[in-house]
Amino acid sequence: MKRSRNMLLFTLFVISLVLFFVAINVFFVSIIGYHFNSQTDLKAYSANVNTVNQTLQAKRGLILDRNGEIIAQDNETYTIYAIVDSSRPSYKNKPAYVVDIDSTAETLSVYLDAPKDYIKERLLSASYQTEFGIYGKSLSLVQKEEIESLDLPGIGFLKTLSRYYPLNHFASYLIGFVNQENNKTVGMMGVEASYNTYLAGKDGNKVAVVDRYGYSLPGYPEEVNNPQDGYNVVLTIDRALQEQLESSFLMTKDLFKAYEVWGTVMEVKTGKILAVGQYPSFDPNKKDITEYQSYLTQKIYEPGSTLKAFTYAAAIDSGNYNGNDTFNSNTFIVGLDKNGDAIRLSSSSNSIGSIRNANSRSWGNITYDIGFAYSSNVGIASLLTKYLDDEIFMEYLVRFGFKNKVNIENMSETIGSINYTWPLDKLTVGYGQGISINMAQLLQAYTAIFNEGKMIKPYLVEKVINSKTNEVIKSYETEEIGQAIKPETAKQVQDLMNLVVNYETGTGRFYKVEEVEILAKTGTAQLIVNNEYSKDQYIYSVVIGLPADNPEIMIYYAFNAPVNNSAHVETTPIKQLIRTVALVNNYRNEKITDGNLVTINEINDFQLKNYTNHSIEYALKDLENKSYKINVLGNGRTVINQYPKADIRVLSNQPIYLLTNMSNIQMIDIIGMNKKDVLSFFELIGAKYNLVGEGVVVSSSLNVGEIINLNEVIEVQFE
C-alpha cells in the first residue's frame, strides 16, 4: 500500500516537472522570444511575422492497365534552393545561409551535375534566395538525401509533385496529359480529363507562422489537415497488346509511307477495349502534340468496304438474300425507273452514273457470296437494287448505330452523316462511300456480327479504386445496346468473312497466320481531300475476328497512305498484331500428326524478375519452365544487364537476353524475329547494324554461333 502511494507521488512529481518546463518554454517563446528546446532566438524572426495557410497538394491517382502496369503516376521530386542573406537568423546555433559560396558551389556542381561557375554565379547574384535552373529541379529523394547529408548551411528543398508517364508514347491519345492551372494539376484530354474528378483527390492545408521571407518559425505550433490522395483508374488496356499495336503502326508507316495509322483490339462479348491508338502520337511527358483529335471517337471518315458486312447483314436479316444467286460483275450503269429509284441499265444512255469494282476489275457472272469474298462494289449495287428496299436498308444502318454516338466514358465524340438523298448515293453508301462514321461506331456495330446479333458498347475503364483501402469506388460492366440482327444472320455473315480469308482469291487471304484461324473483311476507301475524292490517297483497313469458329477478339486496323496495290498483300504489321493477340489470349491451332493431337504454340505469360547482379545459374533456374527463348550473351558468370527490363509481364515465347560480359558474344538465331526484338539485342550488346526492309528477319550477314565483332556492321534483311 505504501509502495503504491510512493509511486503515485512520483508520477505526480514527473507530470508537474514536465508541465513546469512546458510553461517555461512557452514563457520564453511568448515573452522573451527565445525557443528553449531548439535554443533559437525568435526575436530575429518575429519581425513582420505572418500566419499563412499553405496548400498541401494531394497526390494524383495512378492510371493502370488491366494487369496493374503503371501508365501514369505522380512523382515526388524536389527543387533545391539556397539562402544567401547573412541577416537570416541562425537556428540551433547553426548559420541558416550559405557561408562559403566557393566551397558550396564546388560541392553542388558535383551533386547536381552542373558547371561550378554557373552555381557560383547564381549564389553571388542573389540578394536573398536563389534556385539553380534545370540543374536544381526534379531531384529524386535519393539525390535530396545525399545533399542533406552534407549539412551545407543555407541549403533547403521544396517538394513538388509532377505527373510522369513511364511508358512515354504509350496510348497517349487515350491517356491524355495534365497541366498546372491555379496551382492545381488538371487533366487536359483523354482519361486524365474525363476522370479528373476521381484522379485529382482533395488538397489539404497547413496553417503555420512564417517570417517575412515565408519560412516557418521554429517553436510555433502548426495546424495540419492532410490531403486526400486521388483514386486509381484501372483501364481495360493490356500493355502487351498496346505495345504491339503501336509497333505495328510504325511498321506500317515505314512500309507504306503512311500519313496516319489507327486501330483497336477489343473483346466482342464484353466490349472491353484491350488496345487503341493512332500514329502520329506524342509523349505526354514532353507534350509534343500537334493533333488533339482522338481517332477513336473524333475522327470522321468514310469506312469503305468494311461497311459491306452490314449491307449483306441487312439483306440476309430481312429475308432477301440467296448467296448462290449470281450477278454480272461488270460495270454497273445506274439509271432511274419510273418511280425515281435506281436500276441497272444495259447501256450508258440515260444513266446517272456508274459503279465499278476496285481497279475496275470484273469476274463475269459470280455468286453474291463470292462477290463478298472479292469485295465487289457492283455486287452491293446489284443487291441494293434487286433485293433490298432503301427504307429497310436505312433502318438497319440505324439499328447498327451509325446515326448515334457511342458515348464511351464521357469521351468527347463527333459523329458523321449518311448521304442518303439521291438514288446513286443510296447505292454508294452500301459499300462505305457517302457515309462517314467514327471508329467507335464501327467497333460497336461489328460486335453484332461477332456476337450472335447482340450489339455491345465498347468501354475503356474497368474500375476506379481507393488505393489505400482497395475499395471499388466505381466499376463498369458489359452493356448490351440491343439485338441488331438475328443470331443466324450473324453466323451467316461470319461465314462470308471466312470466305474473305480462305477463298483462294479472297481479299483477306494474305492476313492468314498459322497461330489461329481468323475471319476478315477488308476495306479500301478514297480519301476526301478539299471536298473531293483524292486520286493519290486511300484509306486501307481491315476488320478481323478470332478465333474463327467463335470470335472473341476483334481487331480493326486502318491507315491513310499513297495509293498502293499491295496494301492488302504486304500485311506483316497486322499479322504481327494478330499473332500477339493470339498468344496473349492463348488461342492456338491444333492439328493431327500421326494420329496424335499436337498443340501448336502453347503460350503463357509471367512477371520477369530483375536478374542483374545475380548468377547466370540463378537466372536460368528461375526461368526454367517459364520461357523457351532465353539467350545468354557472353561467357561471364553474372548477369550485368537484361532485356526486357525487370517487373514487366512477358510471354513465354518472347526473347529474353541475359548479358554476362562483353567478351565472346555469339550471334543468336534472329530468323523470324520482329524489328523491335532485333534492335533490343543489338543495342544491349552495343553492336553496329544495318536493318533493311520491314516485317520479320529472313537473313543475316552473321551465322548463328559466330563471334560478334562489335566494330563491324551486321546486315539484317526483313520481309
Image: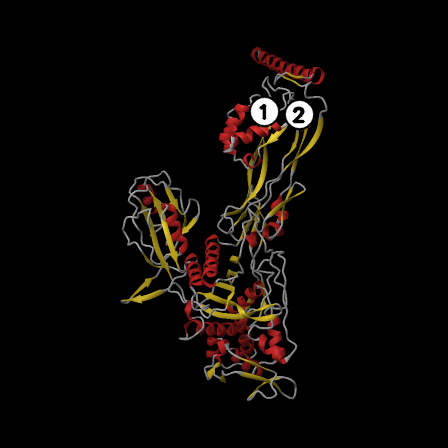
User: Quarter of the image containing the C terminus?
Assistant: bottom left
Q: Amino acid at mark 2?
A: Pro
Residue 103 in the image: x percent, y percent?
52, 23
Q: Could you classify mark 2 by the number of other residues whose Cα lies within 10 Å: few (under 14), some (14-19), or many (20 or more)?
A: few
Residue at position x 59%, y 20% from top? 95
Residue 4: tell me if it is visible: yes
Q: Is residue 676 above or below residue 120?
A: below
Residue 511 vs residue 700, the one in the foreground = 700
- Mark positioned earlier in the residue sequence (1 or 2): 1
Residue 698 vs residue 158: left or right?
left
Residue 154, numbered circle:
1
Q: Which residue is mark 2?
A: 221
Contact (CB < 8 A) between labels 1 and 2?
no
Residue 386, numbered circle:
none
User: Quarter of the image containing the N terminus?
Assistant: top right
| Tag nearer the camera, 1 or 2 | 1
